[in-house]
Image: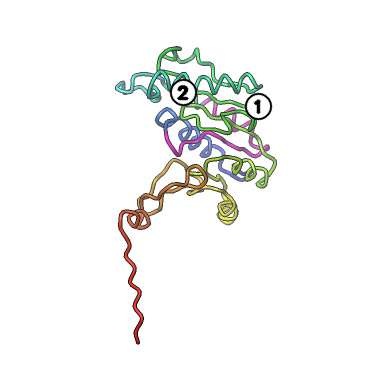
Amino acid sequence: MRADADLGYAVETLVDGAFFNSGQSCCGIQRIYVHRSLFKDFIARAVELTNQYMLGNPLDPQTTLGPVVSTRAAADIHAIVSEALGKGATGLIDARAFAMAKSGTPYMAPQILVNVDHGMKIMSDECFGPVCGVMPVADDDEAIRLMNDSPYGLTAAVFTRDVEAALRLGERIEAGTWFMNRCDYLDPALAWTGVKHSGRGVTLSSIGFEQLTRAKSYHLKIR
């Protein structure tokens, strides 16, 4: 997130992107890089919004955060959080505020981690749960370096009011799809693909349909 971003909108969008479907989305937000000038305000607002989530049975209309897919998945996610905490990260969400969040169940509280780095799995591997790590950055170059420091490359997002700056950054981001001021969104007209370990195949758009066809070449030489 650049210094010129709409802070309130960015917080709302990124928190939703991190915890939508309990974080179980292939294009969900897991790593967030915020310009240093906005970092404290971003964290304060993100924590406030996250604490408003209602963890519970997805059939309950009051629920805004459901369980993860299985108890085993929850244990794997807890392990990633524990590893980060053991290496110096700080968790900003008190799980005790979420009554249904209990060990040995698929119900787990959301978590925002700070004081994180790329030596932690939360910032270097897929978590697939309601957890995100947030780091401050000095400028665009640092943000791009950290964003590209990943074996995956499905989606990435840039939050800014400057379209030209977003386009320049988008050219440098190693991802199959990059967003400006949005995330976790599909458009049937745009190809859905990735790079690196996320780079196999293409769906959606006319390019995606081409993969369902078998090409046949005709070579004719007229004499």
Magenta region: which residues? 25-48
Query: Residue 207: x percent and y percent?
Result: 37, 57
Q: Quadrant of residue 37?
A: top right
Task: Judge whether residue 2 is colored magenta.
Answer: no
Relative horizontal placement of residue 96, taking residue 188 as reference (left or right): right
Question: For the view shown, which residue lies furthest in the right direction?
Answer: 138
Amino acid of disc 2: Gln
| Residue 138 position (above or below residue 59) | below
Quarter of the picture containing the N terminus is top right
- Residue at 36% of width from left, 54% of height from top? 205
Spot occupied by residue 158 in the image (x, y as percentages of width and height): 55, 45
Q: Residue furthest front?
A: 223
In the drawing, what numbered circle is on residue 205? none
Disc 1 element: loop
Residue at 48% in and 32% down: 18
Q: CA distance from mark 2 to mark 1?
A: 23 Å
Q: Residues within 10 Å of mark 1 (few under 14, many from 20)?
A: some
Q: Which residue is mark 2?
A: 52
Q: Earlier in the sequence, mark 2 or mark 1?
A: 2
| Whether label 2 touches label 1, CB < 8 Å | no
Q: Residue at x 41, y 20 (%)?
A: 55
Q: Position of residue 29 (x, y in %)?
A: 50, 36
Q: Is residue 32 magenta?
A: yes
Numbered disc in front, either 2 or 1: 1
- When the figure is inspected, residue 26 is found, relative to residue 77, above or below; the finding is below
Q: Residues within 10 Å of mark 2 (few under 14, many from 20)?
A: few
Of residues 140 and 81, which is closer to you in this image? 81
Per the image, the residue denoted by label 1 is 115
Q: Quadrant of the C terminus?
A: bottom left
Residue 166: image location, x then y, percent:
57, 52
